[in-house]
Structures are given as structure tokens and as C-alpha cells.
Image (cartoon, helix red, strand yellow):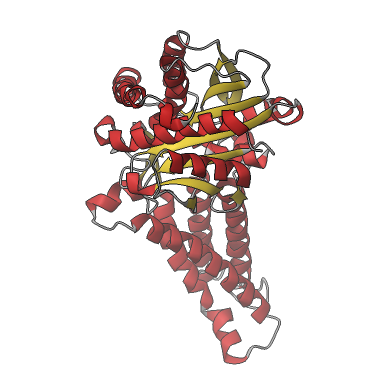
Amino acid sequence: MKYSQFPKAVIKENVDYAVREITNVIKRYGPRESANENCLATQKHIKKEMDTFSDETGFETYKVAPKAFLHFTKTVSASIILAVVVCLVLTLLHKFDGIGPSPFFLAQCIVGGVICIGLFITVVEFLMYKQFCDMFYKKREGHNFYAVRKPRGEVKRRIIISGHCDAAYEWRHTYYSKILHIKALTGLLMGLTIGGAVISLIVAVLAIIANFVDMGAFGGFMVNYSFYFHIFTAVVMVTLFMFVNFKRISPGANDNLTGTYSAVCAIRMLDMAGIEFENTEVVAMITDGEEAGLRGAKQWAKDHYDEYVNSGVETAVLCVDTLCDLDDLNVYSRDMTGTVRHDKKFSQLVMDSAKEAGRDNMKFANIFFGSSDAAAFTQAGITATCIAAMDPTPADYYHNRRDNYDRLNPEAIEAGFEVVVSAILKFDENGLS
């Protein structure tokens, strides 16, 4: 079937259904921290619905430490602040006298070392999404839910529509940006903390070198006075320490119950339209742990790698993450702060599908701050890409209490559903050939 033949009334009915269900989930199940009982209750609620129009449903479990991903913002910032303050006090009290060529030598070594470790942890955790800090945190059981609509004949290709049901800890920067009328507050404060740390590291290295290499007046300044720049870094690190509010969970209406119900409604719409594919299997996957560093998707990709890559069944994963800001509905062919490039053929297929659905304004875009579950699949070597509709500045509801059901945008949800349906139909027609 061509997208032009698909009944538009089915899409509209499913948009209404998604809005009702998202509202119901938020009111009924409450905050959905990664791997908590509310996430599982939400997935069980979805399973009961999907059992009526799916051939198979089920859960897979894994272990996840929900706070391990972002808690580095507390430990790194606190360590840098403590190092600067303690070293400054001890130096001024002459406790470091005689240790090294100058009074600030040991202080520069300590602060430089702490900042270097802090930047390493930040890069590994937030830029590369590695599970580096997980070993230090208590783990609990997370769940990934799946539902399958099987074809009439042999499975020759498989398309997976994925969304995550867990919600984020509140980011104070994005919450207060609207209150303070500073839209770029998040970028400004994050730039100050990261930039300050990088400059402080450079300053520390130059100051240490200046103790052994004659740099003239510049060297004298670095040896005797440059440590005071670290005080500025310590001050801006207070904003990083306050960045995440672990006591409040975003309602997650747009991020990412809209993606969750894109996956649910993908199969529901096919069922309502009476479409049965001959050789294409359609899977709805509802992951947990995306907000904990893509942990659920990473585990799923690891467990299903052979099935998705080596079984001879052409498989592609389309992740949907936030459908709210229609002007920013795009195919995100680059991910994980621009470090991951999604499959070119599949990204183009989704873009072509969007055009067929009448969404001519969509373009290829880059998730330049953060990541989606699609990156976990691409990193694992599984074909994937992502669509999303969110103001990248970021949106004022992003990761805070404003992301509630009253901020849902049915028009953006409808556009996302159209692209998803069109992509499924085009993938069934030709795969990635």
C-alpha cells in the first residue's frame, strides 16, 4: 500500500487516542523515574492495550542505576569546588611552602588533576554515554517492553518503532530559563562550566610548566597569580552542582510519551486499517532507561544484535523522541552531540517517507546536545535513525515540570504519526534496497 491510500481518519483517531492515553498515564501512574514501579506499571498498561492488536507481547529485564548517568554533575562540581577552596586556604596558610618551586605549585597540581578527572568523567558519561559510573551506584531492575505484528508469510524484513517511557529528572536550567526570560540560560551556564573547567586545566598546566621554564613576565604571572582564575571556575561550578534536581521528575508528556505512543499506535493504526504485510514484521518497542543514559536501548541492542544483524532479516529501528514543536520536526541523522552518524540509507528512506506524507519542510538535523535511543543502536552496529519535533534551544518544557499533558500538541503528534506510517509502508515496499 502507498501512503496516499492509507485512511487519514485512522491517523486522526490515533492522535486523539494518544492524547487521551498520555494524559491518563500521567494522572494514573505518576512520576516515571527510570526503572521505577511507575515505569513498569505504564508498560503493563500498554501491554494490556496492545495484547488486543498484536501477535506477541513481552518484557525483557536488565539492571540499571538510574542516577549514575547524571550524578556526575554533583560529584564533579563538588570535587572541583572543594579542591579549589581547600588548596587556596592551605596555600594562603603556607601549608604548601617548600613543596615544589613555588607556593602555588602543589595547589595547581591538585586542582589541575581534579579538573582533568572531572572532564574525563563528563566526556565519558555525557558525550560518549559510556556506563563508566554505574559500578559505583546501586542498581535495580529495568524493563523493555515489545509488541510484534507478524506478517502472513516468511519474515524477510523487520522495522522497529521505538519510544522510551521513562521521564527525566528536572533540569533547573531549562525550568528557570522561562522564569528569568533567558532562553539561552542552559547553553550559557553549561558553556561557562565546561569552558571554565577547560581553561582552568590549561591554566594549571601552564602554571606548572612555568615553574621550570623561563616564560618571562607571563611565566611569573602564571606562577604567582593564575590560581585565582580557578576561583571563577569554582563559582560557576555551583551552577553545575544545582543543574539536576533529583527530587523532581518531569511528567514526560512530550519527552517521551509522544514517542511511546508513536510505537503503540504504529501497530494500532495498521490493525485498524486492516493492513497485513506479506514479509515485513513490525515491532513496537517501549524502552526504559533512556533518561539514565540510553541504558535500556543499549541492553536491547546487545541482546538482539545477532537477530538484527546476522539472521538474514533486514532490520531497521526508527526511534521517535518528542513530538511537540512542529517547526522542528526533522530526521535526526546525527546523534549523541553530533558524534554518531545514523544509517544513511534508512535516514533517507524516512526523509522520503516524510515527503510522501506531505511533510516537505523536514530536513536532516543533528542532536547537538544529548542523545536519543537511536544512537545506542547505531553504536552497536544496528541500522537506526531518529525523528523528533523539539525546539533545540532547548524547549522551555524540556526536562522539567512544564512537560505535562497540557503542553501536548496534537498537530505535531499527527505529523509524527504520518511520517511513521509512511516509513513503515515504504520499508515494506522495498526495504533499504
In-image side of 205 versus 256 (left or right): right
**Residue depicted at 59% across the width and 71% down the height:** 202
Q: State whether residue 205 is above or below residue 406.
A: below
201 vs 158, nearest the viewer: 158
Q: Position of residue 80 (x, y in %)?
A: 52, 57
Of 77 and 284, nearer the camera is: 284
Q: Position of residue 248 (x, y in %)?
A: 35, 34
Residue 262 seen anywhere in this rendered image of the structure: yes
Residue 375, percent from left and from top: 58, 42
Query: Against 28, is 349 above or below?
Result: below
In the rendered view of the protein, which quadrant contains the C terminus?
top right
Q: Residue furthest bottom?
A: 216
Viewer-side residue, 314 vs 328: 314
User: Taking 177 as reference, is 354 above or below it?
Assistant: above
Point out residue 255 in the picture as x, y percentages from the top left corner. Answer: 39, 36
* Drawn side of residue 212 relative to residue 164, left or right: right
Q: How many marks?
A: 0
Q: Does residue 138 appear in this view?
A: no
Frontmost residue, 14 versus 404: 14
| Residue in the image at 52% along x and 72% along y | 227
Image: 228 above or below 59: below
